[in-house]
Amino acid sequence: MKDLIYTARGNDKKSNQIDRIIRDKMQVNQFIRKYFKELSVIKCISDGLVVLDKFHRLYFLNEAGKEFYYKPDTVKFYEDIFCCTNYYDMDGRELSMSEMPGARALAGETISNESIKIVRPDKTFYCSINSNPVYDENNALIFAVLCIRDTTETMLIYKKIEQQRERLLKVEREKNEALQSAMKLKDDFLYLITHEFRTPISVINSALQAIELLCREEITTNISKYLRTIRQNTFRQLRLVDNLLENIRYGSGNFKFNFTRFDIVFATREIIKSVEPYSKQKEIQLEFQSNLAEKAVIMDEEKYERILLNLLSNALKFTPRGKKIIIELTVDEIKDSKTMCLSVKDEGIGIPKEMQEKIFERFGQVDGVLSRKNEGTGIGLHLVKQIVHSLRGDIRLESEEGKGSTFSIYLPIGMMDNIREAEDSKDEESDNCRIEQAVSIEFSDIYYN
């Protein structure tokens, strides 16, 4: 009797399973009838169409879809597609079953245009897959639909383009390396030649000083005039050589700074005083303004002198007689940092808007009749910009043609990371001689009798 009961119960359980399968089958059939009425058309489309039920069974596969599976007639469940086949993403990583678009769609994920590499015993190709989960009226997942497109030809073209791009990049890199090597060779050659130029110029300058010191009584007025002309042009050559050397040092990374502690207000005033003989020669008034009577800063004093002298030299060269140049020095304290602003404002010819960037380039010059009368090499402002940027500062220009220009230098003071021991400036007499020499060289284009 018990055996009969168990048998009946077993049959009931089996019957329930059969009923559930039949219901699922009918549910899928209803969907097919509802959404795939034109099944003959679907079978003929060029993209592969795959329908999986929630038990991973392959319910529908059109003719185009068979091309994507190895021995498609043997594929009954989605897991069967791994038979003798490996799948990879575009980074070359092999995909597991759970990472495949079909399995993810059956888990409720929507996949859009996912590229996959398929490696089979007979061929290797690429495809793009779109997949969506499908739900019944009760929001229960019943199956997943996959649309597969062969993108092998597109991928091969893309790979050829990538290979061509890599070849072009390699050629470009080789060209850049050759160019950099040529530029380094050029800079090394220029550095060597410039040094060779500097040596005889220094000898000529020393000889002039010796003549003036030792033969003072024998120098006539005419000889003195010729000596001044020689010295003037010696300084002009020395200025060119020094600017070239500094530019080459900056380009090669050998641009060094010597930070000291000094009074920047006093130093600025002294530099302006040294320039006054040249401004008086052109009847140009120099006016110095500062919001401080004194201010100790930590900075490279010689580089600061070079910046100011270059700006004053340009202002004097391009400012007509009877005009004014204003030099303004201000120091702002913002939170824990301090910034100084040095501005040189002239009433000169001004700079056209389209030329304002060019003047900071190496050998950049402003075209025009007046500029040609005072033409230089175009290295000075480029060097000033390099110095300012190396000091973590900024240089700005405001100019209007025919009305003048204002160059503003913004520099942090006393905040340099590479300051080890900033010594106080010393030997005032030596500093004055250095400034006088620097002024004579920087203003060698402005004839002073």
Image (tube, rainbow, N blue to C red):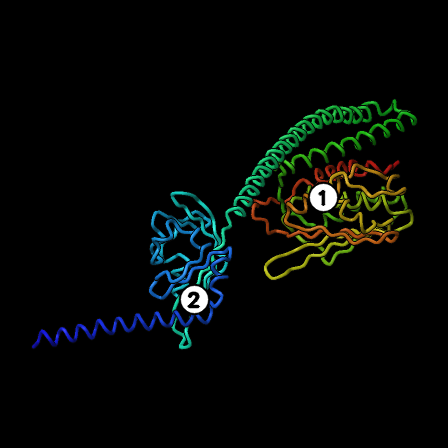
Q: Residue at x 34, y 71 (%)?
A: 24
Residue 64, given in percent of the width and then of the height, sits at 46, 54
Q: Is residue 11 above or below residue 333?
A: below
* 262 and 89: which is toward the camera: 89
Residue 408, given in percent of the width and then of the height, sits at 74, 52
- Residue linked to disc 2: 133
- Nearer to us of marks 2 and 1 is 2
Q: Quadrant of residue 123?
A: top left
Q: Kindly give the residue lying farthest to the front in the view shown.
A: 40
Q: Quadrant of residue 186?
A: top right
* 413 and 167: which is toward the camera: 167
Q: Is residue 238 above or below residue 27?
A: above
Residue 298, given in percent of the width and then of the height, sits at 63, 48
Badge 1 marks a residue whose secondary structure is helix
* Quadrant placement of the N terminus: bottom left
- Residue linked to disc 1: 384
* 121 and 434: which is toward the camera: 121
* Quadrant placement of the C terminus: top right
Q: Is residue 335 above or below residue 192?
A: below
